[in-house]
Amino acid sequence: MIAMGRNAFALYEERIARVKDAIALRKPDRVPIVSPVQKFVYDYAGVTMKEAMYQYDKTKRACKKFVYEFEPDMDFGPWFALPGEVLEIVDLKWLRWPGHGLEDNNMYQFIEDEYMKEDEYDEFDADVTRFLLTKWLPRSAGNIQGLSKFPDIKNAMWFGWFPACLPFASAELQGALQTLRYAGEALGRYYKFVGEYFAEIKAEHGFPAAAGSFAWAPFDLIGDTLRGTEGVLTDMLLRPAQLEKAIEKMVPVGIAMGVQGLQITGNPFCWIWLHKGMDSFMSDVQFEQFYWRSLKRMIDGLVAGGVTPMIYGEGWLNRRVKYFAELPRGKCMLHFDNASFDDMRAAKNALRDIACISGNVPNLLFSYGTPADIKDYVRKLIDICGRDGGYIMDTAALLDDAKPENIRAWFDFTREYGVYR
């Protein structure tokens, strides 16, 4: 529970310093605990995912219950309860969520598809913005398909202004723009709620927000949202030059995600989810060519812009450690999902003077283990990764299902055992 007799400002400074010290490879007072907990937050408060995505008063109640009872060193708050109203207004195609293909208490699910066809690389390369506006967005959402009629504004100079304006008379385009207006208003309400939540937990009890922005590896920006997994893996073999060109165009996009987030929120922490970089997706040669080179340039750009990259590995990353040794020293956090104690020891030894590491208490242990199991795993993990600083305690992956007593044991024992003496 919240420490009594400590003002919120002092608690905030203590928590944020703890995390920053770990990232900078210094020894904080103890091992920080930062974890992107998803559905558990709402299950614990008796709030369904449908309620969390549509009823912000219940979302706030659930998030505050979690953060005030368990006291992570930074909090993700409502970020993982996406605004259902916005998704509904645009009729988003690449998500299923409660009430739209899923039961009320299911976590939303990503639906992958080819939103850019294999023969559209040249069009994408010629004008990324226009392609996203007139192809990707209309294919992504059923209620804004009229954006496909958006005019080519670069031809609007002089008398080109007349034909450039003509498509705005289209009922389909007008309908899409009206839908975007409603979606923007709904999104404004969501961001206002999120901003108020983080301001309240900071003012009331000194909890920092865990994220100022989110970003994705350049390869994943193409593979997740445009080509899909099957498409992008095929392109690595059949059209590698076109794929590399497209990936390169995503480097400044990823940098902008983090830098603009810092400018808007003042929060330097940018969480970068690595979806397709795991060991089993591609060989080391392919990883270096298609994934790592662009990701490294993006990370360097983020650091140059004052951003702290929180690189969240999903799946096995054990063969990738040698590449992460090229990260800028003391500027990043690198999360490990699936890894044995031997793997974590190898990662710690390789990155000891380079990057803070985090993870990897197994999610299954939270669901099916006991508090004693949790404590035993945490003890071993801290002994391996945390003794000299440069370690942040976290679950293996974003947490949905868990026994509350296991979560309590995890937080309490980390605070007890993870003290630097």
Image (cartoon, rainbow, N blue to C red):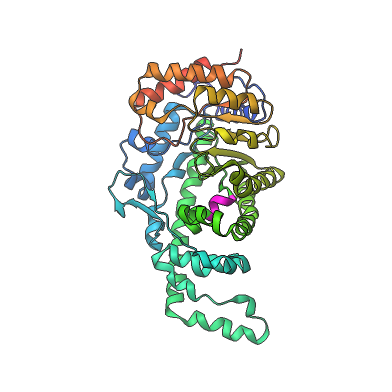
Could you say where residue 361 lies in the image, as x and y percent from the top left?
46, 26
Q: Quadrant of residue 61?
A: top left
What residue is shown at x 58% (from left), y 38% (from top)?
A: 310
Q: Nearer the viewer, residue 278 or 217?
A: 278
Could you say where residue 99 lies in the image, as x and y percent from the top left?
29, 53
Q: For the view shown, which residue lies furthest in the left direction?
A: 103
Q: Quadrant of residue 267?
A: top right
Q: Is residue 350 above or below residue 182?
A: above
Q: Is residue 6 magenta?
A: no
Q: Is residue 411 above or below residue 242?
A: above
The rendered magenta stretch, by its main secondary structure, is classed as helix
Could you say where residue 215 lies in the image, as x and y percent from the top left?
56, 48
Q: Is residue 320 above or below residue 385?
A: below
Q: Nearer the viewer, residue 178 or 296?
A: 296
Q: Nearer the viewer, residue 207 or 83?
A: 83
* Quarter that holds the N terminus: top left
* Quarter that holds the C terminus: top right
Q: Is residue 220 magenta?
A: yes
Q: For the view shown, which residue lies furthest in the front direction?
A: 238
